[in-house]
Amino acid sequence: MEKNKNGILLETGTNEIEIMEFTIDGNLYGINVAKVREVMVSAPVRPVPHAHPSVEGIFKPRDTVITVVDLPRYLMNRDFEKQEKDLFIVTNFNKMYIAFRVHSVEGIVRMSWRDIQKPDKTISGGKEGVATGIAQYGEDLITILDFEKIAADISPQTTIQMDEVKKMRNRRECSLPIWIAEDSVLLSKIIEESLTTAGYDNIRSFSNGQELWDTLQEVNQNGVVDEQVSLIITDLEMPQMDGHRLTKLVKTDKDLQRIPVVIFSSLISREMWVKGKEVGADEQLSKPEIGHLVDVIDRLLEKRAEEEEKEYRYEQ
């Protein structure tokens, strides 16, 4: 593998990721380049009263006010002296801009999701830890951080809110099978609970796209795919196989392409939306929009039922 400095990946569905390497206290970490808007020299920050201890404050580099998170303090649980050579990694995910202070940026590497392993609980800090994957690049081990989890720890209202779905109680129950590919145990549980509250009672979750794809092939070979899965919801960032690759495999398989695929991710920017369309996603939603997700599922399942009814009548 060679280092790549050309920005976002041009081809979609290759199961590759570009990771920006950065250091904190001499340790090597990584972030998906798709989350990064820019890297800039650290700047003066205005403190915010009653903020989380890891929130330095806010600054306004141009027209947007951005929250600054002291990532060294968050990860190490202690204060580090601020240095002029510190950098801000300005990110955009879940429709938010957040700048994370780091000590250095080492560069960008491209690798396959297959080279990224889910960390065990001793590394990730339990089921809901902040290490979402461990990648080996040459002799280096890169700890890929779960920035959505970090943001949710600091500001819980930035993640999926169950209140949206609780308003949907007393809906008609639906037993059509829905499969979910999501590597975060926390988010997978929240999505399951949300859909169950909304009346969907036949849900099966997988920890990455590869597990879902392998199982999908098994049920297809047994000729029971229509009975086993009516709709797929997938995250984008997952070890082993990402959501774009999973979507492309489903939509290019003549036996499976009828299954609606919804990409539910924190990374639905304009660029990523285009990539999702290229691989055939039926819908793409940003993760906080759980109420919208339920509406989309309703519509896609109703549309599929209508198509199947037309086919049945035609065959008769």
Image (cartoon, grey):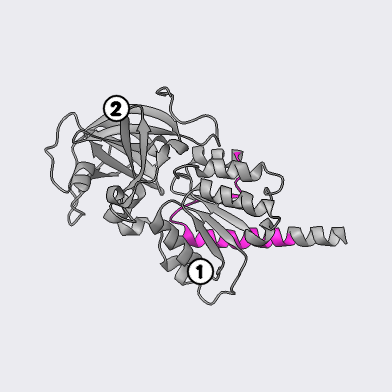
Answer left or right for 287 relative to 303: left
Q: Amino acid at mark 1?
A: Thr
Answer left or right for 88 relative to 180: left
Mark 1 burial class by Cα count in 10 Å: few <14, some 14-19, many 20+: some
Residue drawn at x 50%, y 69% as measured from the top left = 196
Q: Nearer the viewer, residue 71 or 117?
A: 117
Residue 26 coordinates in the image, percent (x, y): 20, 33
Q: Nearer the viewer, residue 232 or 102?
A: 232
Where is 109 relative to 279, above or below? above
Q: Amino acid at mark 2?
A: Glu
Q: Nearer the viewer, residue 316 or 122?
A: 122
- Which of the labelled discs sits on residue 106, or is there none? 2
SS for tag 2?
A: strand
Residue 146 coordinates in the image, percent (x, y): 35, 46
Q: Is residue 273 magenta?
A: no
Q: Could you say which quadrant of the image residue 179 lies in?
A: bottom right
Residue 186 coordinates in the image, percent (x, y): 38, 58
Can you say which quadrant of the picture contains the N terminus? top left
Q: Is residue 289 magenta?
A: yes
Q: Are marks 2 and 1 in contact (CB under 8 Å)?
A: no
Mark 2 burial class by Cα count in 10 Å: few <14, some 14-19, many 20+: few
Where is 28 relative to 265, above or below? above
Residue drawn at x 44%, y 43% as measured from the top left = 239
Residue drawn at x 41%, y 59% as measured from the top left = 160
Q: Which residues are magenta?
A: 279-306
Residue drawn at x 29%, y 27% as measured from the top left = 106
Identify the residue position indicated by label 1 in the image: 196
Examine the rendering and report whether any part of residue 171 can be seen.
yes
The single residue placed furthest to the right in the displayed view is: 316
Can you say which quadrant of the picture contains the C terminus? bottom right
Examine the rendering and report whether any part of residue 57 can be seen.
no
